[in-house]
Image: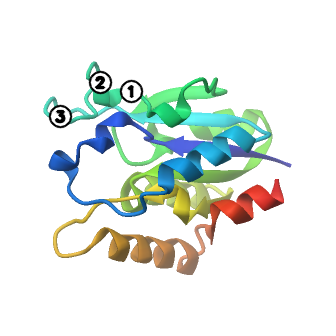
Amino acid sequence: MTTALVLIDVQRGFDDLEFWGRRNNPDAEANIAALVKAWPGPVVAVRHDSVRPESPLAPGTPGNAFKPELDGLAPDLVFGKTVNSAFHGEADLHAWLGERGITDITVVGISTNHCVETTARVGGNLGYRVVVPIDATYTFDLEDLTADQLTAATVTNLRGGGFAEITTTAEVLAAL
């Protein structure tokens, strides 16, 4: 059984805190880098191509590029998306995984309660065993909730809803 590492929107545009606001988990990028470095199987890098021209993630802007933690990475599949789920992007991720016999995915990236959670939910609905090392994700304060509260809600949604196993980077690395 092969597990794919799915990198969700690990992009420079998320460093624009004036645009996004306060974030949580300052160790997320280091944890993502550790997983990328040690990962023995296929790696998928998904990029959010915002349809809003003022977005730091708009195609053709410096923020659309992947963060330095992915420099030198040669993913097995790279594609863009304009919605939250990586299963609804330019590439047919479900077909790509199926063609390779991949039944398990480990999902990391930005932002926890949007694209990571949505990808994990859709993956779970499609029958994948989904693992989310929550310390390899981060998000931003939104409305009346802090980034940490939103992350806690995502943990509850994914674990309690049966969509994904929630773990840590250290636990994933120990199991490789």
- Mark 2: few/some/many CA within 10 Å (<14, 14-19, 20+): few
Left or right for 10, reference 13: right
> In what element is the residue under mark 1?
loop
* Residue that appears at 60% across and 23% down: 72
Name the amino acid type tagged 1: Ala
Does the CB distance between marks 3 and 2 fall below 8 Å? Answer: no
- Mark 3: few/some/many CA within 10 Å (<14, 14-19, 20+): few
* Residue that appears at 42% across and 58% down: 26
Report the residue marked by disc 2. 62
Left or right for 60, reference 98: left
Query: Distance of mark 3 from mark 2, alpha carbons?
Result: 15 Å
Name the amino acid type tagged 2: Pro
> In what element is the residue under mark 2?
helix
* Residue that appears at 39% across and 54% down: 111
> In the rendering, which numbered label is found on residue 52?
3
Query: Distance of mark 3 from mark 1, alpha carbons?
Result: 16 Å
Report the residue marked by disc 1. 65
